[in-house]
Image (cartoon, helix red, strand yellow):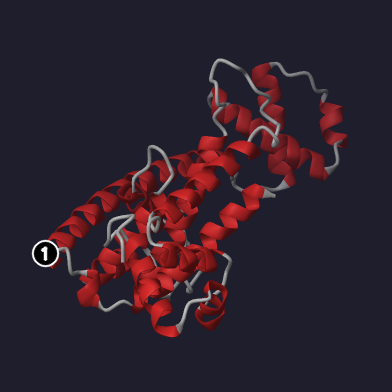
Amino acid sequence: MAWSSGDPGRLNCQEVQACLAQMSDADLRRAERIADFLARGLGGLSGEDLLQEACVKLLSGERRFPRDVYPLKVLKSAMHSEASNARKTERASPVDARVPLPDDSADRRSPEVALLATEQFRALIATCSGDPDAELVVLAWADGLKGAEAQEATGLAGKTFDAARKRATRKLAGFEPAGAVP
Amino acid sequence: MNEKTDEDRVSKLLDSFFDELQAMPDSDVLAAESPQAVRTRAADRLARAVQEAGRRRMAAARIQAVHVNRAPVTPISVQEARDYIARVIEDRNYTLAARQLEEMPEAEVLRLYQQLRELEDDAGPAR
């Protein structure tokens, strides 16, 4: 637990609380949508759980809240770390609790982490199933492509790409049901 | 490796999703939800988080207090340390000849003093 007066680059507890309380309604909603995005495929953990835990860690000082950084971005990073930690916690549990596994073996954990990451990725892609253009956009983004590069990778024309990009965002955000036909 | 690839893909997808969500007009973000409902949920969440964070900070402070109380011992002179060690040896019937204590290097005297103080703090004060 680390509140340090020697770190002027971070907000203190009261400042974090004020910062979170002053977020706009739209940004609060965006934070919820990002939380749900990150919770997809993570069994037993809801988006609300992720968001709540991220707030607790920022307020308690367990996680640093940098000064002059957009609060939604801080929340996104904190929730991303929480989701990653949740995967690691799940991977540390033996698949069959009756079978003891060595504590020091990293190998035993990797397949489970890989499976959870794959499940999460598939769950995200599935939000666009039934909408091939939106799925292409999501796959391009997952490859790290943005803007014109992403459009080129999808092979979609300008307006078609823009429409697919907006639908993909709305589906990933849960604003449109998965599988909806454009 | 598959593990890295899919974790990496999720991270990259998150980055693009975040950018697009930020660029989306507020009115679209809030289209299907009443701002009042969002605000109420956020206020409840923040209140719970403040309470839980306080509980965790308190628990951490208690743990730290135990360490702080145990660790530092008031600095004293080598002669005072020798006198203290001699008293404890006599009280507790530890085996250490007076001559050994006299010949002990100063750093060793202070180290032994520190150890004895920690032991005495656990067992109760020496005379």
Relative depth, front residue between B65 and A18: A18
Q: Residue at x 47, y 57 (%)?
A: A80
Q: Is residue A59 in view from this perspective?
A: no
Q: Is residue A174 above or below residue A100?
A: below
Q: Residue at x 31, y 46 (%)?
A: B52
- Numbered circles on residues, count: 1
Q: Which residue is mark 1?
A: B36
Relative depth, front residue between A54 and A108: A108
Relative depth, front residue between A23 and B81: A23
Q: Is residue B56 above or below residue A137?
A: above
Tag 1's secondary structure? helix
Q: Name the spot of residue B50 as percent of width and height, x first.
A: 28, 53
Q: Name the spot of residue B36 as percent of width and height, x first.
A: 11, 64
Relative depth, front residue between B79 and A11: A11
Q: Name the spot of residue B97 as percent of width and height, x first.
A: 83, 23
Q: Given the image, on which type of amino acid does mark 1 rest?
A: Gln
Position of the C terminus of chain B by quadrant? top right
Q: Residue at x 49, y 38 (%)?
A: B66
Quarter of image, res B18: bottom left
Q: Is residue B4 above or below residue B125?
A: below
Q: Name the spot of residue B13 as percent of width and height, x first.
A: 49, 64
Q: Residue at x 13, y 60 (%)?
A: B37
- Please give the chain letter of the residue carrying mark 1: B
Relative to A177, is A65 on the left or the right?
right
| Circle 1 Cα neighbour tier, 10 Å, few/some/many (<14 / 14–19 / ≥20) | few
Q: Is residue B48 in view from this perspective?
A: yes
